[in-house]
Image (cartoon, helix red, strand yellow):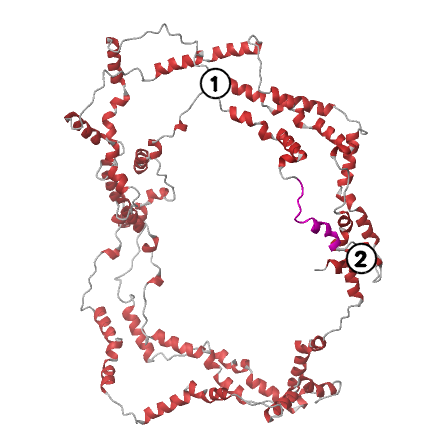
Amino acid sequence: DFANQILPPQYKYKEAYEKAKGKHVGFRSLQDDPKLVHYTNVAKLQSDREYKKNYENTKTSYHTPGDMVSITAAKMAQDVATNVNYKQPIHHYTYLPDALSLEHTRNMNQIQSDNVYKDEYNNFFKGIGWIPLGSLEVEKAKKAGNALNERKYRQHPDTIKFTSVPDSMGMVLAQHNTKQLSDLNYKVEGEKLKHKYTMDPDVPQFIQAKVNAFNISDAKYKADWKKTLAKGYDLRPDAIPIVAAKSSRNIASNFKYKEAYEKAKGKQIGFLSLQDDPKLVHYMNVAKIQSDREYKKGYEASKTKYHTPLDMFSVTAAKKSQEVATNTNYRQPFHHYTLLPDALNVEHSRNAMQIQSDNVYKADLQWLRGIGWVPIGSLDVEQCKRAAEILSDKIYRQPPDKFRFTSVTDSLEQVLAKNNAITMNKRLYTEAWDKDKTQIHIAPDTPEITLARVNKINYSQSLYKLANEEAKKKGYDLRSDAIPIVAAKASRDIISDYKYKDGYRKQLGHHIGARDVKDDPKMMWSMHVAKIQSDREYKKDFEKWKTKFSSPVDMLGVVQAKNCQALVSDIDYKNYLHQWTCLPDQSDVTHARQAYDLQSDNLYKADLQWLKGIGWFPSGSLEDERNKRATQILSDHVYRQHPDKFTFSSLMDSIPMVLAKNNAITMNHHLYTEAWDKDKTTVHIMPDTPEVLLAKQNKINYSEKHYKLGLEEAKKKGYDMRIDAIPIRMAKASRDIASE
């Protein structure tokens, strides 16, 4: 009740709003409200768009008298420069559509027409992609790539197929070594013995291992914590942490922070009209004084007006400078005269102009423009082909695999290879068996067939799991007092780590066993067993003898290997007659050196070694120049130049240029604010001026720091919050009211 008296309820707050819903407020039209009409007029006055409306309508309009001196002079200069009045046809006449001369003219125009000439190209070929496969350049690039391909020139040994004879000496020796070094075969006996030996469960090592497992067990380490989690917890709403958390939440509540603002909502503050408040009237007067628009009003009215005396010194100097700089009075023609179109000198001038005309001179070459040119068969192409053949390293150095080689069929190597191929042929080896396999029939009641069927049933995975799958389908009936369940619980208690370590914990600190290892027969027996199972002791003799290999010299395999090596080896194949020593200055040694130098490929290429590694730039070569020329001929960019590529110069004393300069000076913001910038740094305002004091007060009013100063100081002091405090009860009541 106390909270309801202090804080207004939510429905009371919106009561006036709900009552006013649906009722007419204000005027029926904008024109009926004098304030809105006044605001509209003020907005129009302050609108920059309305202000510039007339300027925008007239800024693109330009009026020039038709009889102005510059316009008349420009027209006369245009008549002289253009070809309008230069060619005057004698008369006009009309042709019939089937006139012979008109037909000839049409045919000639079609022959000379660039559009007709390019019609087939534009309508059919343009836009069709072109694949360069098979062209001269692509084939040359392929040949050059194959010739310079390092991968084809140097084949890696692993790309060459190699087949080893399975019964050769090396393969047989490798198989024996693999069997000797096999870790699986080496440990077969040890694995068998390991699975047949049983150790007593009361051995001290086993007991120690179990104790260590209990100490290291993570499950035992967290057992008490898991039990505490399983019990749960009891948290009451009047606990001290819960009450403190609720108090902190109410203090930080945004509702309390905005309580004063919510109370002041809907109440009138200030005056009924703007004119009733003297401070606001004063601020409006100050704003008008400081208004940039009022300040620039006179400037805007006079900025487009510019007055300059004609006899001003700068204008006179500019005119003289322009006369000196321009070409206006530099050339003074003698006089202007008019000639008849049939005058003799005019005819001579026309003939001379046609003779000197570059367009007429090049007219017979216009039909060649745009025609492509294929250089195949030209002198330069033939020279390049011939030079490529001369410099081709592929033609100069033919690889040995290009020469045909024929072996004698009855030579020793060929006959031996044939016999080995027949011996190693898998098909001939199994040919007789394959024939018998399709002809022999075995009775179904043969003992081997019957045994195979029984073995299949014994090894069948599906039959092995059949009873289990059928039992799964039947389901099960498991009771808590069933014998397997009781036995499992008893086994769990037996296997329990706690029960297992109970006896060990009781015996801790008591003396167990003998004083010495040798006094305990079980420990001695365990050490003996460890030696038997020791992999190191087991491999001791093998490690001593594994690097020693003894083979009889007269063993059949060794003798055959020696004979094969003698046949394959080149040692006994070449028998030198004798060896002698030559002096370095003997005549035959000198001749031999010269002959070796002549045949030496290194000396032959020695003069080319300095070129190795030097880069080559194709700029200036025949192909590069030819490509540049073809690009220039076919370039649409060069053929069709854009108008913005032509340079354009404007006269500095022309009317638009002078007007633009004056407008630039007039619109210069720096010159416009130059006087104000100077006054800004020289004028000093007293600190007790009303405007300055008002600005300081506004700064304090708008300061976020001062606005939150009281809250920050209250935070620093802390708080003493009780459950039955009046603000707490008010907040709870407000929360219940505002609760959705």
Q: Is residue 586 left or right of residue 310?
A: left
The part of the chain drawn in magenta is 11-26
**Residue shown at the point (36%, 73%) measured from the top left:** 170
> Which mark identifies residue 384?
none
Query: Which residue has dot 1 on it?
Result: 63
What is the quadrant of the N terminus in the image?
A: bottom right
Mark 1, Cα crowd under 10 Å, few <14 / some 14-19 / many 20+, is few
The alpha-carbon separation of the residues under discs 2 and 1 comes to: 80 Å
Q: Where is residue 85 drawn, in percent x and y?
A: 31, 15
Asked whether the residues under the numbered discs 2 and 1 touch, taking CB atoms below 8 Å apart as contact, a structural biologist would say no
Q: In this picture, is 201 found above or below 317?
A: below
Whether residue 565 appears in this view of the structure is yes
Whether the magenta-drawn stretch holds residue 687 is answered as no
Q: Where is residue 92 drawn, in percent x and y?
A: 23, 19
**Residue shown at the point (80%, 27%) measured from the top left:** 686
Q: Where is residue 235 drawn, in percent x and y?
A: 76, 71
Which is in the foreground here, disc 2 or disc 1? Answer: 2
Q: In this picture, is 96 found above or below 544?
A: above
Query: Which residue has dot 2 on it?
Result: 4
In terms of depth relative to the viewer, which is nearer, 648 or 17? 17
